[in-house]
Amino acid sequence: MAKKWYPVVDVLTCVECGTCVGFCPNGVYDKTKAPSPLVVNPVNCVDHCHQCGNRCPVGAITYVGDDTGWIPPVLREKGGMPDTTPNCGCSCGCGGSCG
Ligand code: SF4
Ligand code: SF4
């Protein structure tokens, strides 16, 4: 288990889907607070594990101690930037909320 490796959730980006909380098998997140991702046992995190971050749909998870150059897959696919393309298919600038 890691002493200097654990997940940090960007609460402004997180949509509280609960994926990370439900996935981690090591009790790093408090499952009683699901779907909110509350890190309660950071020492249980496995050194160099990115599995919860790989599953986060919005790229809200990074890791203390990460020197690997890892980028959340959802951001990697967009060239390292969050996808702000409207999903309603229009170009009104609503950010996807008008549909
Ligand atoms: S990085 Fe791995 S061990 Fe650490 S919280 Fe995420 S799933 Fe659990
Ligand atoms: S997987 Fe990502 S969006 Fe979902 S609860 Fe965890 S940090 Fe938040």
Image: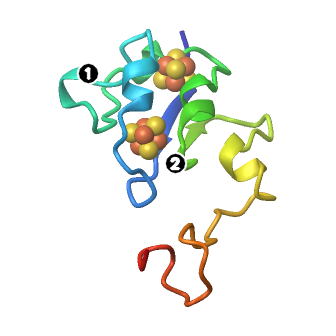
Vertical placement of 28 versus 71: above or below? above
**Tags 1 and 2 touching, CB below 8 Å:** no
Q: Position of residue 93 (x, y in %)?
A: 55, 88
Q: Residue at x 61, y 70 (%)?
A: 84
Whether residue 3 is visible to the viewer of this picture, yes or no, is no
Q: Residue furthest bottom?
A: 92
Q: CA distance from mark 1 to mark 2?
A: 18 Å
Q: The disc labelled 1 sits on which kind of residue? A: Lys
**Is 83 situated above or below 35?**
below
Ligand 1 contact, mark 1 (Cβ < 8 Å): no
Locate residue 22 relative to residue 86 in the image: left or right: left
Relative to 84, say whether 21 is above or below. Answer: above
Q: How many marks?
A: 2
Quarter the C terminus occupies: bottom left
Judge by depth and name the residue closer to the eye, 75 or 94.
94
To which quarter of the image does residue 55 belong? top right
Identify the residue at image location x=60%, y=23%.
51
Label 2: how many residues lie within 10 Å, few (<14), some (14-19) or many (20+)? many
Question: Percent position (x, y) of residue 12?
Answer: 40, 61
The numbered mark, 1 or 2, whose residue comes first in the sequence reads: 1
Q: In this image, 11 relative to 59: left or right?
A: left
Q: Quadrant of ligand 2?
A: top left
Residue at figure coordinates x 64%, y 34% from the top left: 65
Which residue is the extreme one toward the left? 32
In the image, the residue with mark 2 has its CB under 8 Å from the nearest atom of ligand 2: yes
Pointer 2: what residue?
60
Where is mark 1, residue-wise? 31
Q: Position of residue 62 (x, y in %)?
A: 58, 42
The secondary element bearing badge 1 is classed as helix
